Image (cartoon, rainbow, N blue to C red):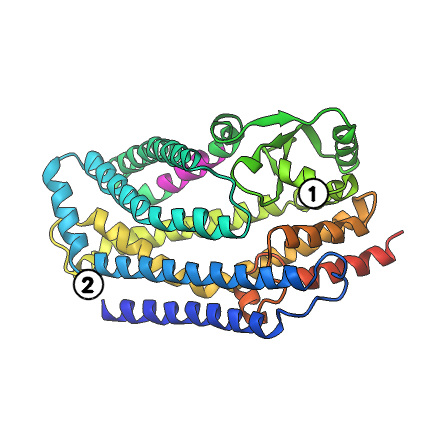
Amino acid sequence: MLIILIVYLITLVLQYWLDIINIKHMKKHGSKVPAGFEGFIDETILKKIHAYTIEHNTFSLFESLFSSMVTLLFLYGGLLGRYASWVSSLTDSFILQGTIFFLFLSYASSLLSVPFSLYNTFRIENKYGFNTMTPKIWLTDFIKSTLISSVLMIIVLVCGLWIVLESPHLWWLFVWGFFFIFSIFMMYISPYVIEPLFNKFTPLEGDGLEKKITAMMQRTGIRISRVFTIDASRRSHHTNAYFTGLGRTKRIVLYDTLMSRMEEHEVLAVLAHEAGHWKKKHVLKMIMVFEALSLAGAYVAFRVLKSGILADIFGLPGNAFLAELVILAFVFGIVSFPVTPLFSAISRRHEREADRFAVGLAPLPEALATSLIKLSKDNLSNLHPHPLYAAVYYSHPPIVERVRTIRELAAHSP
């Protein structure tokens, strides 16, 4: 018990140290306009990036610290055992116990996050010109997301716990299989059922851009069913674009904020990058890695839970299966930190591959560089992250390095 606590605290200290050196590095170098960014970024924008990054990262640090304190109090202050005992007193049904146990924990977590969400949305994001959400929209979104997550969680919990009851020796395999099938199912239906509950999707029409997008994708063998714009500006001025769907038929979704700030050739370049991810099968590869690790994790969980070692270490009374699952998730969270740099490196490699593909596909290769500069400006992205911080956390290469590489590739493209 003490060893787990010490390792957790060491992990927290390392995470906070990385945050601090990242902020210090930006303070030291953040006043310099990167080469190639002239004309897009000036000293006024740099000061705004500087202030936003510091305020946002400091806020995230305090939020993380609060979350860690609550977690430690719950696990090490005896609250977990008392909560588990209280839930078990409500019903003798194992499935009902588990559903109540995790559903109430989810509600408690959501409620504790409310003040932070409100402050971030209506204080920080509002201060820097990002937030367009009204309190009514925020509340509506919160209620919708809570209801949807409750329904989905009940389905997952009831099915998962039923499998544990029915197959006490192989539940780890069947639960993993169920989660895998359910996640694929959600990837299929989410764009058609869940996402429209929060945003309005409008088919892209009128200026011929959809035909150009479709034609560009056809050259790569990607079949696009439709191109949509999403009313993201109702909530934020942040910009983005993404693919949805699985298999051969996919949809492209463009934020209306992206459409209003980028030239046509820049939109095509951004989508060429996304096409690169599909052609290089990055999504499929990451799903395979994740599922392989999930299967291994499910088996390890089965062995640990079967041994009862966690119940002994934390002094949990009686049948502590549900409480042990919480502790196991806590331990897995600690174990995952050392491998974070590895997955970040893999993701950055995928991004570089997608950039190279986009330079060869986009009508104007240089457009990918200018689109990324505009995205970094519009989103106030840190242009000077600490190299170690970027190595651990960044899923994309730092934007200055990325733009420089793209321009070098574009200069040698036919």
Seen at 55% across and 27% down, the residue is: 200
State which tag comes first along the sequence, 1 or 2: 1
* Residue 129 locus on image (x, y percent): 55, 48
Seen at 57% across and 57% down, the residue is: 395
What's the magenta region? 174-184
The three-letter amino acid code for the residue at tag 2 is: Ile
Q: Quadrant of the N terminus?
A: bottom left
- Quadrant for residue 9, please give it: bottom left
- Quadrant for residue 225, please give it: top right
* Residue 86 locus on image (x, y percent): 12, 44
Q: Main secondary structure of the magenta part?
A: helix
Q: Helix, strand, or loop for circle 1?
A: helix
Q: Residues within 10 Å of mark 2 (few under 14, many from 20)?
A: few
Residue 398 visible in the displayed image: no
Residue that numbered label 1 is attached to? 261
* Residue 313's disc number: 2
Residue 253 visible in the displayed image: yes
Seen at 68% across and 37% down, the residue is: 259
* Residue 80 locus on image (x, y percent): 19, 53
Tell me if label 1 and label 2 are in contact, CB under 8 Å: no
Q: Helix, strand, or loop for circle 2?
A: helix
* Residue 133 locus on image (x, y percent): 48, 39
